[in-house]
Amino acid sequence: MEDKYMILQKEISKLVEEGACVAFSGGVDSSLILKMACDASEKYNKKIYAVTFNTRLHPMEDINISREVAKSMGAIHKIIDIDEFENEKILTNPIDRCYQCKKYLFEKLLEFAEKNDIKYILDGTNADDLKEYRPGIKALKELGIISPLAKLDITKKEVRQMAKDLNVSVATRPSAPCLATRLPYNTNISFELLNKIEKAEAYIKKLGFVVVRVRVHGDIVRIEIEKEEFLRFLDKKDLIINYLKDLGFVYITLDLEGFRSGSMDIQ
């Protein structure tokens, strides 16, 4: 892994020298990229922009975390406000929604880069992402976005270790994919429903559960948490049921398979 780190450092340094910005979510992957880009920028006296998308499909928590992390690293934090609902191709949550969404977002980022004379846009796609159903990666490739972690075959586990070694504050932060992943494909997406899902997950996290997904299938809510947390979850079940019913959800269930990334991709 030490060799991968040195190669990654050299790769990012070269890109920063020519002018680069980072598509920044505040997650561990993009935070590692940003940290290394900021370190390299000191050598070349370059500005590093950390650009965060403020969208309807991502939790508001991401904005606050990304702002704090970018500031701690010395990057210039920029927020691009985007309403994906203006793109009708996204509204019905098609199976290629991630492709449609990524393309829509990163086209806006390309406009930002061009206005600020930035040659390269970097993102935090890692090697593990290439093994899952991630149609958004196709959009990144089409638009010429550079994914150093994926290019150098760096896994999520390796990312977390590198981030820890560099004292990146979000090294252990769980992944936070867009809220549309809580709904089945070909289901109409509404802002009202996404807002309920975000509130439900935030509430359960406040009760001490770190990894939470509230998946919605019509009237049925399927809650995914780590299996090790099941007994503690049952102790809190009345609080959770009451809160989610107050939000308007009807049937509240706990998924006995536990948390699985991409469980909505199962056909």
Image (cartoon, rainbow, N blue to C red):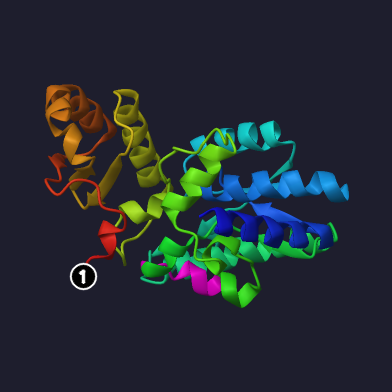
Where 258 sits versus 240, above or below?
Answer: below
Q: Nearer the viewer, residue 73 or 8?
A: 8
Q: Residue furthest front?
A: 3
**Which quadrant is the C terminus positioned in?**
bottom left
Above or below: residue 188 compared with residue 214: below
| Residue at point 64%, 66% (across, down) | 146
Residue 178: % across, % down? 44, 51
Q: Is residue 88 left or right of residue 257?
A: right
Compared with 182, 88 (above or below) is: below
Residue 184 spot, x, y in % from top left: 28, 60
Task: Identify the residue at horizontal 21%, vertical 32% (top origin).
Answer: 245
Is residue 185 highlighted in magenta? Answer: no
The residue stretch that appears in magenta: 132-139
- Magenta residue check for 135: yes
Q: Secondary structure at mark 1?
A: loop
Q: Which residue is mark 1?
A: 267
Q: Is residue 262 left or right of residue 46?
A: left
Residue found at x 58% / y 50%: 30
When asked about the image quadrant of residue 130, the answer is bottom left
Q: Give the residue type at disc 1.
A: Gln
Task: Between residue 244 and residue 145, name the one nearer to us.
Answer: 145
**Looking at the picture, how far across and down is residue 31, in whole percent?**
59, 45
**Residue sitting at x 13%, y 22%:** 235
Residue reaching furthest to the right? 45
Whether residue 130 sits left or right of residue 69 in the image: it is left
Q: Quadrant of residue 21?
A: bottom right
From this viewpoint, is residue 61 visible? yes
Q: How far from the left and from the top, in percent, is residue 122?
A: 65, 59
**Residue 80 visible in the displayed image:** no
Closest to the observer, 173 or 180: 173
